[in-house]
Amino acid sequence: MPWNAPYYARLGFRPLADSDPALTEGLREISRAEAAHGLSVWPRVCMRREVV
């Protein structure tokens, strides 16, 4: 959904860049699997929130 990323950004999550070490091979595989199922119609991002 187009509004998810801005919503989660307001909660303190940040998008992961392709070069970010937090974007693990597991997350990349999930993204590839979602795209294979047609879920890449909208721009998708992986996001992370630091726990303090």
Image (cartoon, helix red, strand yellow):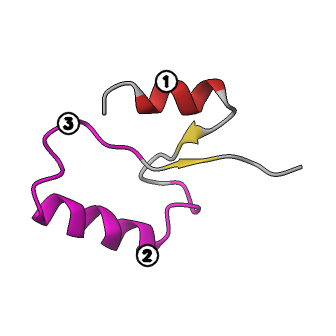
- Residue beneath label 1, please? 6
Q: Secondary structure at mark 2?
A: helix
User: What amino acid type should be assigned to the residue bearing mark 3?
Assistant: Trp
Magenta stretch: includes residue 44:
yes
Which of 52/18 is in front?
A: 52
Q: From the top left corner, tell me how far across and down residue 11 is, in percent.
A: 67, 31
Instruction: Specify few, some or many for label 3: CA neighbours under 10 Å numbering under 14, 14-19, or 20 or more.
Output: few
User: What amino acid type should be assigned to the residue bearing mark 1?
Assistant: Pro
Magenta stretch: includes residue 12:
no
Q: From the top left corner, tell me how far across and down residue 2 is, in percent.
A: 31, 27
The mark that comes first in sequence, 1 or 2, is: 1
Instruction: Specify few, some or many for label 2: CA neighbours under 10 Å numbering under 14, 14-19, or 20 or more.
Output: few
The mark that comes first in sequence, 3 or 1, is: 1
The mark that comes first in sequence, 3 or 2, is: 2
Report whether 41 appears left or right of 14: left
- Residue beneath label 3, please? 42
Q: Secondary structure at mark 1?
A: helix
- Residue beneath label 2, please? 26
Quarter holding the N terminus is top left
Extent of the magenta region: 20-45
Location of residue 6 with respect to 22 vertically, above or below: above
Q: Can you tell which quarter of the image residue 8 is in?
A: top right
Q: From the top left corner, tell me how far across and down residue 3 is, in percent.
A: 39, 24
Q: What's the CA distance linking mark 3 and mark 1? A: 14 Å
Q: Residue at x 13, y 41 (%)?
A: 41
Q: From the top left corner, tell me how far across and down residue 13 is, in percent.
A: 63, 38
Residue 49 — which label? none
Q: What's the CA distance linking mark 1 and mark 2? A: 24 Å
Q: Secondary structure at mark 3?
A: loop
Q: Residue at x 43, y 67 (%)?
A: 27
Q: What's the CA distance linking mark 3 and mark 2? A: 21 Å
